[in-house]
Amino acid sequence: MRDYENVDVGVLEDFIPEIVKAASSSRYPVYRGQCSFDWEIIAAMHRHDLLTTQFRTWAEFEADQIRQFKIAARNLLPEVPQSEMEWRAQACRFEGFTSLTAWSSNPFVGLYYACAETKDQADGAVWRLTPANEGFIVDQDFEMHEAEAHLYRPSIQQTIENQRVHFLTHPSPAQCSRPESFEEYCSQRPEEFHLCKIRIPHEEKADLRNKIALCGIDAESLNRT
């Protein structure tokens, strides 16, 4: 299974064209950086084996995770989330177990995370996702169908604004079967998405980090509240 585009880049000048050709008034690309090229696009919750938990369904598991996050974080957030999707987005941002993954409309934010070092000196990856229809992007809970993937952007918190974060919802199986990766999901809907995986060589990571820091993309700017 590999129905997505693959691109290798070595320097920042190679990365720029991969941004420009994806952007237009009718297409809305978002980017996700992963420090290891071999990683799938899969939500943190879905990396668990549901059979090792006390829950019968993925929905029950996620609901319990969000309940715990609400108790722990309610007094720590500058603004109280106003919907369940906002709570899920905040839990995802704080690395909680949800069915979401974080993306950015700023390609250099994706590049920043792809350039993180790993113990095994792995190549990084920037995923570029371009949906084919505007209905994929939602602002409210009621616009989503749990059996379908959607791209959601909450309107809260400066850190989210700094990173221009969008949250991709990953559909969960009805029962305890293995959730599919987003690559698998896209391969079944080739007319709905264009997915591209851009390889970032390990030996170029440090130089790329330095260059995008000159553009204002670094740990301090991205985590500023």
Image (spheres, rainbow, N blue to C red):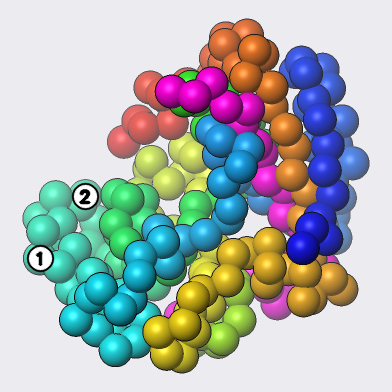
Answer with mark 1 or mark 2, whichever residue precedes in sequence. Answer: 1
At label 1, counting other C-alpha atoms closer than 10 Å, the crowd grade (few under 14, some 14-19, many 20 or more) is few
Q: Is residue 192 above or below residue 17?
A: below
Give percent across and percent down for residue 10: 78, 18
What residue is shown with label 2? 78
Q: Nearer the viewer, residue 147 or 87?
A: 147
Disc 2 residue type (three-letter): Pro
Residue 95 seen: yes
Q: Secondary structure at mark 1?
A: helix
Q: Position of residue 76 (x, y in %)?
A: 14, 50
Q: State the quadrant of the C terminus.
A: top left
Where on the picture, by quarter, is residue 21?
Answer: top right
Q: Residue at x 56, y 86 (%)?
A: 147
Which of these two is toward me, 12 or 120?
120
The residue beneath circle 1 is 71
Q: Residue at coordinates 47% horizontally, 82% vertically from top-left? A: 177
